[in-house]
Image (cartoon, grey):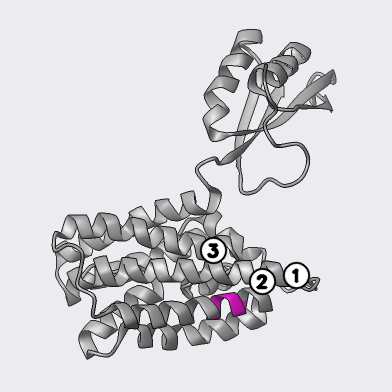
Amino acid sequence: MSEGQAANFMQKVQVKHKKIPLKQVVKRAILITIGAIIMAVGLEIFLVPNHVIDGGIVGISIILSHLTGFKLGLFIFVLNIPFFFIGYKQIGKTFAFSTLYGIIVLSVSTTFLHPVPAFTQDILLASLFGGIVLGIGVGLVIRYGGSLDGTEILAILSSKKLPFSVGEIIMFVNLFILASAGFVFSWDRAMYSLLAYYLAFKVIDITIKGLDESKSVWIISENYNEIGDALLHRLGRGVTYLNGEGAFSGDDKKVIFCVITRLEEAKLKDIVTEHDSSAFLAIADIAEVRGGRFKKMDIH
């Protein structure tokens, strides 16, 4: 999981929240249920039958299940329980209970799906599709306020005491777990596990942010009026003019700010270059956009 993904958990800090509306609770529960079941499909229908593992607590659970013969769902539930209590005390009640619910659904779903035969015996296909399905399931759960693996919680808390970022801690732990598959199964299975994990990692990002990922844009140019009008009428995006001052020159500057989607980035660059090839342009990813007038305007 990336540092940006794990940062979603940081928002679940211990602060006083207003009571969540029932409609929102039901929606969250339904989507976490769907996400957990999708993850169970990725595990039991693609990865586990082909001895390909995931990272985190789930990966450890797959290895222990293989070595002992006990149900995978049992290990997923038991090994995640300590992290539920840590999350409850350190990160927040809503996040902790969403996580517990997701883990219960995942554990039960893997138990019911275990007798279902694998869709394919081709290890490459199993790794590819298993990673994709897994990523969709995990991404849905994270997007709606939960988690299906306790290592993220551990990484968030450990990062406060260690000189490593959340993403670095998660990566180190998962590489160690994935490498363990080489000793338990075989080294080719360990490499396939790494491939599945990488695909899941990418799909989680897409699921959380959406294909229409938003980006913030900052433009500084003497031709701010022309650029702003072009963005408004040709791209259909509203712009905001901010007042700025150059630290070196002391001159007053106009800064254009707007929010676009990933698919509009190339067109925006063309517009800016067309009106001022030397304009300062900064583009950054945005995790979420709410309020205002972000909805695209009709262009006639």
| Side (left or right) of 84 relative to 52 | right
Q: Which quadrant of the rendered structure holds the N terminus?
A: bottom left
Question: Dot 1: few (<14), some (14–19), or many (≥20) neighbours within 10 Å?
Answer: few
Horizontally, residue 299 falls left or right of residue 261, namely right
Q: Using the numbered discs, state the Cα–Cα distance from disc 1 to disc 2 in whole angstroms.
A: 6 Å
Q: Are marks 3 and 2 in contact (CB under 8 Å)?
A: no
Badge 1 marks a residue whose secondary structure is loop
Residue 25 shown left or right of residue 4 in the figure: right
Give the residue number, with chain letter if any, for mark 1.
Answer: 21
Q: Residue at x 60, y 13 (%)?
A: 273
Callout 2 amino acid: Val
Residue 161 in view: no
For the record, the magenta segment spans 96-100
The spot of residue 194 in percent (x, y) is 28, 59
Picture disc at residue 298:
none
Question: Circle 3 sits in a helix, a strand or a loop, which is it?
Answer: helix
Give the image quarter of residue 227.
top right
Q: For the point 34% across and 78% down, which residue is it?
A: 110
Q: Where does label 3 land, which residue? A: 142
Residue 136, percent across and down? 43, 58
Q: Nearer the viewer, residue 138 or 300?
A: 300
The answer to whether 158 is drawn above or below residue 89 in the figure is above
Q: Quadrant of residue 218?
A: top right
Q: CA distance from mark 1 to mark 3?
A: 19 Å
- Disc number placed over residue 25 in the picture, else none: 2
Residue 16 sits inside the magenta stretch: no
Look at 78% across and 71% down and name the residue there: 17
Query: Can the viewer see residue 28?
Result: yes
Contact (CB < 8 A) between labels 1 and 2? yes
Badge 1 or badge 3: first in the primary sequence: 1
